Amino acid sequence: MRALRFGVLWLVLGAAIAAATGDAGADATQSLGPRKAEVAAPAAEPALPEARDPLAPPAILEGFDPEARELEGEVFVAGLSAPDKRAVLSLDSGLQQHVANVFRRYEVPFGAFVAVEPATGRVRAYVSHSSANPGAGDLVLDATPPTASVFKVVTASALVDTGVGSNARVCFRGGASRIMARHLENDATSSRCATLSDAMGGSINAVFAQLSDEHLDGPTLTRYASAFGFGHRLPFDVRTVPSPAEVPDDRLERARTAAGFWHMHMSPLHGAMIAATIANDGVMMRPAIVERVDNVSGEVFYEFEPTEFRRVIPRRTARIVGTMMQRTVADGTARRAFRDPRGRPFIPDVAIAGKTGTLSAERPYRGYTWFVGYAPADAPTIAVAALVVNTPRWRIKAPFVAREGLRYALSHRESAD
């Protein structure tokens, strides 16, 4: 897999990321050689094969690089180390090229887009783009961007599981751009109140900070973050790196983390799998981009089979969180991206669930915007993650890219039916 070179984005946060990552991605080895006391050892028996890492790519995919692909007709293929074999990819060539054209047309400084089938884990789009640094590498697998408010999906899942209903209501003042100690207390004198569902749609930081402070301790938030894939590698057809994760001990900083202020980072592939998990009733499938391995003669050596990676949350929890996520597009932070100036939906008659995220870093300025979501909300066929990293002068943000990807994918599906 080609080396990731997204470090230009992280001049400010590199040290923090390194500290958060630690040695989580390292493979531990242990010497099993003879002890000095064993002077009369019996004849050596054949060594048993080492247990295969369940997160490792299939051995037959050695040498596979998802970026080193070519279009043959309407199918993308990629080479492998074995010269007589090739990987045939699951990408939808139309969707892949459509989103790539969006990134090029709007000269997005850094961006990525991933689309997966929630029920199978098949990757249908895998787009990495940089107009600012064409040699930036595979941004789809880069796990350094902050999750921003996308992490509210994890927090909401934990809250629902602990008995907090979507109609749980708190009152607050401020907290839009930063969370202070006063925002952790319910302000009964304020006329501004919102439910957990309102807070998901409107990405209201103070509500998430208050509810998480009241109902979630550090170990619980850590456990849910880990269940959603933070802090360890995800399985895929190439080796991934852990999404850096830190749940602070400090009360205020932990509440900020639950609301989406730093401490958590993820790759666009990871973001797509979070959305797909909610869409798939709480089950995360193993993502895969290789449909099969064959040769030019048509002999097949490997075929993808959908595989459950883990159950992350109960079905009921996923349904409740997914319903709250519909507010994001219907009347929340992504409404303008999914409707024209007259309020008409760009994707009519389709309910869409999603979550936006926005966060910025200075020196140099980087504006991170996310959209993760799925559609149709009542019978999901596609889950997406879009990331756009802008400089001070920008043209589009992530919800625009997600809308264009979803619009193409859903219209393509309807025409195919």
Image (cartoon, rainbow, N blue to C red):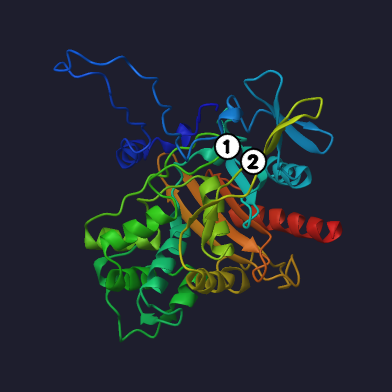
The residue drawn where x is 62% and y is 20% is 81
Mark 2 is surrounded, within 10 Å at the Cα level, by few (under 14), some (14 to 19) or many (20 or more) other residues, namely many
Q: Position of residue 370 (x, y in %)?
A: 54, 54
For the residues marked 1 and 2, what is the alpha-carbon distance in whole angstroms?
Answer: 7 Å
Q: Position of residue 166 (x, y in %)?
A: 46, 78
Q: Position of residue 122 (x, y in %)?
A: 65, 48
Relative horizontal placement of residue 299, taking residue 142 as reference (left or right):
right
Q: Which residue is mark 2?
A: 289
The residue drawn where x is 32% and y is 72% is 210
Query: Which image quarter: residue 278?
Result: bottom right
The residue drawn where x is 58% and y is 34% is 132
Of residues 19 and 334, the one drawn nearer to the viewer in this rendering: 19
Mark identifier at residue 237: 1
Residue farthest toward the left in the current orientation of the protein: 37
The secondary element bearing badge 1 is classed as: loop
**For the C terminus, which image quadrant?**
bottom right
Mark 1 is surrounded, within 10 Å at the Cα level, by few (under 14), some (14 to 19) or many (20 or more) other residues, namely many
**For the N terminus, which image quadrant?**
top right
The secondary element bearing badge 2 is classed as: loop
Up the image or down, 55 lies above or below 410; here it is above
Q: Is residue 261 visible?
A: no
Up the image or down, 109 lies above or below 370; here it is above
Contact (Cβ within 8 Å) of mark 1 with mark 2: yes
The residue drawn where x is 65% and y is 52% is 401
Relative horizontal placement of residue 315, taking residue 39 as reference (left or right):
right
Q: Amino acid at mark 1?
A: Asp
Q: Is residue 262 visible?
A: yes
Q: Position of residue 164 (x, y in %)?
A: 38, 77
Relative horizontal placement of residue 29, taking residue 378 as reference (left or right):
left
Q: Amino acid at mark 2?
A: Ile
Of residues 97 and 287, the one drawn nearer to the viewer in this rendering: 287
Q: Which badge, 1 or 2, comes first in the chain's sequence?
A: 1
